[in-house]
Image (cartoon, rainbow, N blue to C red):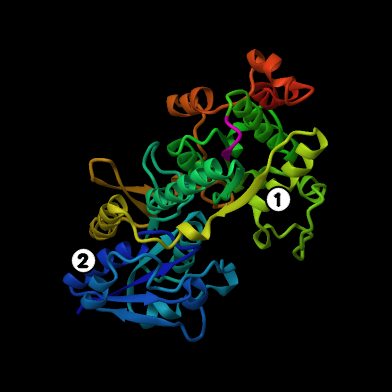
């Protein structure tokens, strides 16, 4: 029997985690390693009594296509003084496999450096996971879980769109995506949403609630001109990341605040916030429209992975062993469209603070140009005369003027 490998899952769930755990476990078990799965993420890893299980082939095989994570996850981000060599030394760990997003990857990099100072030599390979699709992989190469979450989100958005048509209402959908708008953009483009709002759009103007509401009204009025009194708007929750605390507080929405005085956005529905502010504005300008909020987030994180992620995650899992055998460490495992495995070294994608920089939606692509300039529906100067039937100042709701494009 050789040494062991330890698997840690950090952050929130994403479809395909179990496929990665399964594939990693199988290839290492085949070569005589023991596989230890940590429950509770980094918090458990550095506790006095780590909670873990030894993974055998039967367990690995049984979870391969399930949603969620067979290993309990945690968002705990340990401080440097929490680090310890105990678990690694006691269990003869040769490889730490981390499955997670940018925070999990950055922490793994810190742990690796700490262990080196203690003369504990282990390899560290990270498997990039997030439905937000915001890790800095090559252009067009998704993080695992994104495609499955997008698929589930599209089904929900299509149903909501049909409800809008049936009821004659508007639905304001808020989609997950901390800083980046990939999920909102992907879902919105797939269902032909008349308006998609993501933080990356705001290249020439500040992200404010007023600007967002005006963009929503722009598409509502355009649809009225077209004789369609209903629709959906998809807004990425990432817009909040680019707002100041003062902007958020000035919204008039009641928030709780953390110890640092920042609004605790995780405690409220973002769709509700956007919808309330929209209703206030349409009442002010006397625009006849009914709208309802839909939060799109937790519903898509633990769905069963689609075929794309089942295959992709299997390649990534087996790719961990491939990179391990080549002696690589401090890297992410990636699989290109051809299925070839490559390492992406964390030191090449981290900033001076050791944090992995997020990948935002690239607005300078033909795809983005087509969606925002051809696929969406909004007020332009040619609509001003017809728009006056619904609003007094159509130019205030001109899409390009709002964004200063």
**Cα distance, mark 2 to mark 1?**
47 Å
* Residue at 38% across, 39% down: 138
Q: Secondary structure at mark 2?
A: helix
Side (left or right) of 218 relative to 250: left
Q: Position of residue 365 (x, y in %)?
A: 45, 26
* Residue at 52% across, 39% down: 360
Span highlighted in magenta in the image: 228-232
Say which of marks 2 and 1 sits in front. Answer: 1
Q: Secondary structure at mark 1?
A: helix
Counting residues from the start of the chain, the first of labels 2 and 1 encountered is: 2
Q: Position of residue 159 (x, y in %)?
A: 47, 48
Residue, disc 1: 273
Residue, disc 2: 27
Front residue of 8 and 328? 8
Label 1 crowd bin: few (<14), some (14–19), many (20+), radius 10 Å: some
The picture quadrant where one finds residue 212 is top right
């Amino acid at each position: 029997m050789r040494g062991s490998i330890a698997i840690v899952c950090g952050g929130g769930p994403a479809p395909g985690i179990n496929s990665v755990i399964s594939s990693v476990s199988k290839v290492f078990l085949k070569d005589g390693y023991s596989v230890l799965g940590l429950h509770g993420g980094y918090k458990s890893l550095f506790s006095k009594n780590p909670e873990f299980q030894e993974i055998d082939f039967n367990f690995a095989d049984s979870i391969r296509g399930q949603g969620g994570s067979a290993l309990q996850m945690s968002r705990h981000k340990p401080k440097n003084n929490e680090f310890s060599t105990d678990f690694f030394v006691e269990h003869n760990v040769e490889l730490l496999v981390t499955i997670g997003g940018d925070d999990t990857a950055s922490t793994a990099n810190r742990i690796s450096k700490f262990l080196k100072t203690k003369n504990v030599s282990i390899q560290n390979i990270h498997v990039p996971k997030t439905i937000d699709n915001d890790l800095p992989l090559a252009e067009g190469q998704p993080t695992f879980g994104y495609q499955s979450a997008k698929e589930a989100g599209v089904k929900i958005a299509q149903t909501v769109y049909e409800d809008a048509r049936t009821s004659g209402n508007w639905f304001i959908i808020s989609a997950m995506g901390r800083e980046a708008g990939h999920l909102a953009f992907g879902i919105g483009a797939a269902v032909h949403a008349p308006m998609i709002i993501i933080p990356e759009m705001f290249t020439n103007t500040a992200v404010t609630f007023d600007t967002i509401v005006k963009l929503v009204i722009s598409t509502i009025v355009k649809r009225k001109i077209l004789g369609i009194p209903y629709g959906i708007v998809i807004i990425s929750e990432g817009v909040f990341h680019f707002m100041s605390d003062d902007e958020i507080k000035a919204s008039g929405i009641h928030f709780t605040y953390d110890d640092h005085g920042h609004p605790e956005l995780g405690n409220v529905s973002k769709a509700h916030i956007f919808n309330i502010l929209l209703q206030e504005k349409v009442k002010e300008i006397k625009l006849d429209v009914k709208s309802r909020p839909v939060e799109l987030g937790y519903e898509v994180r633990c769905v069963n992975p689609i075929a794309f992620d089942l295959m992709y995650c299997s390649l990534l899992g087996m790719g961990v062993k491939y990179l391990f055998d080549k002696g690589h460490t401090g890297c992410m495992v990636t699989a290109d469209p051809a299925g070839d495995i490559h390492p992406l070294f964390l030191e090449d994608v981290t900033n001076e603070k050791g944090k992995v920089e997020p990948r935002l939606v690239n607005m300078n692509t033909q795809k983005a140009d087509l969606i925002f300039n051809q696929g969406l529906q909004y007020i332009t100067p040619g609509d001003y005369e017809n728009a006056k039937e619904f609003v007094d100042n159509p130019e205030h709701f001109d899409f390009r003027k709002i964004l200063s494009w």
